[in-house]
Image: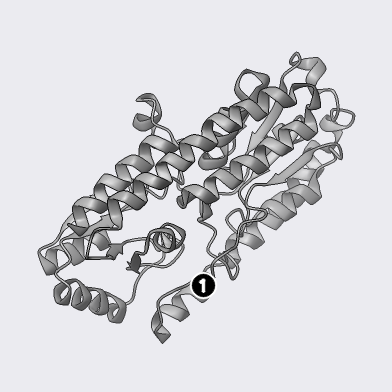
Amino acid sequence: MKKNKKRASCFLAIAALSISVLLTGCAGKQKEDKGDKLNVMTSFYPVYDFTLKVGGDKVNVKNMVPSGTEPHEWEPGTRDITNLEESNVFIYSGAGMEHWTEDVLKSLSNKNLIVVEASTGITLKEGHEEEGEAHEEEEKDHDHGEFDPHVWLDPQNAKKEMENIKEGLIKADPVNKDYYEANYKTYAEKFDKLDQSFKETLSPLQNKSIVVSHEAYGYLCAAYGLTQVGIEGLTPDSEPDPARMAEVIDFVKENKVKTIFFEELVSPKVAEAIAKETGAKIQVLSPVEGLSDQEVKDGEDYFSVMEKNLVAIKDALE
C-alpha cells in the first residue's frame, strides 16, 4: 500500500502539470455545458448507487471505479481528474476507504467543487476485531487507517450516507431541494425495512459466527449480533499466513461451520483451500464494494444485493 501511495503521489504531480493548461477556466462552466443537471462524480459503487437514487433525473453521475473492479487498491487516472475538474459535486464514502482522496482534491483547480464525505456523522469501528500477533502484523501492511471503512453494510449507516449525499446535492442545487428530500424519504423507508428484515431473520438463530474471506462485515455483524471470523484482513488481497489459516481451519471444525464466504470480485482460492480442509462449502457474500458487469446488466442494486446477503447468512447459520 505504501508503494501504491508513493506511485499515486508521483502520478498526481505529473497529472496536475499535464492537464492544468487544459483545465484553466473550466470550473464553474459545467451546468452551461450540460444543461441544468448537476454534474456529480462518485468514488465507488455504494455512494454511486445512493447518489443515483437521491439525484434522479436532476443529476449526471459518473462513477470513478469501473464496474467489476475491486476498489481497495484502485487509483484515479487522468480522465478521472479531468472529470472532477468539470464537476459540481464529488461524493466519496470516506473513513479511510479512498486513500487517494486528499491528494487528488489538493491537485484540483476547481475550487467551486462541493465535496461530500458520505460517512460523516457515523460512529466508526476500529479497523480490526481479531487478536493475534500474526494477524496484527498483516494489518500493518494495509493503510485504511485506524477505522473499518465498510460502513454501508449496516443499512442504518447506509441511510446516513444517503442523507449526507442528499444534503450535498441540496447545497449544490437548492432550487430542487424538495425533489431530493422526497427521493431520500422514499429510500430511507427502504433502508428501515431492510434493517428490520435483518433483525427479524437473524435474531432467532442460535449460531452467530460467520467465516469470511475479507474482514469487511464488522458493521453488519455489530448491528445484528453476529461475529465475523476473517481469513484475511480489511484489504481483500492480503495473504493470510499459515498460522492464521490453521486458526481458521480449527475454528471451522470446532464450531461445525458449514459455509465459508468469499467475494465475486476477489479470488476465492483461500476460501476454497479452507473449505477443502474442513468439508465446508463456499458461498458469495457481497461487501457491495462493486457490482459485476452481469449484476449491473441484471439491474441489481444495493438493496437487492443486501437481500441476497441476508438469505446467504441465514442459510449458513441455520
Q: In this figure, which residue is indicated by the disc labeled 1?
A: 141
What coloring was used for the rendering?
Answer: one colour
Look at the numbered disc 1 and give the secondary structure of its residue.
Answer: loop
Residue 96 lies, with reference to residue 302, above or below; the image says below
**Mark 1: few/some/many CA within 10 Å (<14, 14-19, 20+):** few
Most extreme residue toward the bottom is 133
Q: Residue 95 location, x and y as percent?
A: 61, 58
Q: Quadrant of residue 299?
A: top left
* Residue 78 in sight: no
Looking at the rendered structure, the kind of residue marked 1 is: Asp
Q: Residue 254 location, x and y as percent?
A: 15, 77
* Residue 25 in sight: yes
Nearest to the observer: residue 58 or residue 81: 58
Q: Residue 196 location, x and y as percent?
A: 39, 46
Residue 110 lies, with reference to residue 121, above or below; the image says above
The residue shown at (54%, 51%) is 157
Left or right for 137, reference 55 = left
The residue shown at (14%, 74%) is 253
Q: Residue 100 location, x and y as percent?
A: 66, 54
Q: Quadrant of residue 212?
A: bottom left
> Where is the N terminus found, in terms of image quarters?
bottom right
> Where is the C terminus found, in terms of image quarters?
bottom left
- The total of numbered circles placed on residues is 1
The residue shown at (34%, 64%) is 226
Most extreme residue toward the left is 279
Nearest to the observer: residue 223 or residue 302: 223
Nearest to the observer: residue 264 or residue 92: 92
Residue 208 lies, with reference to residue 193, above or below; the image says below
Left or right for 108, reference 279 = right
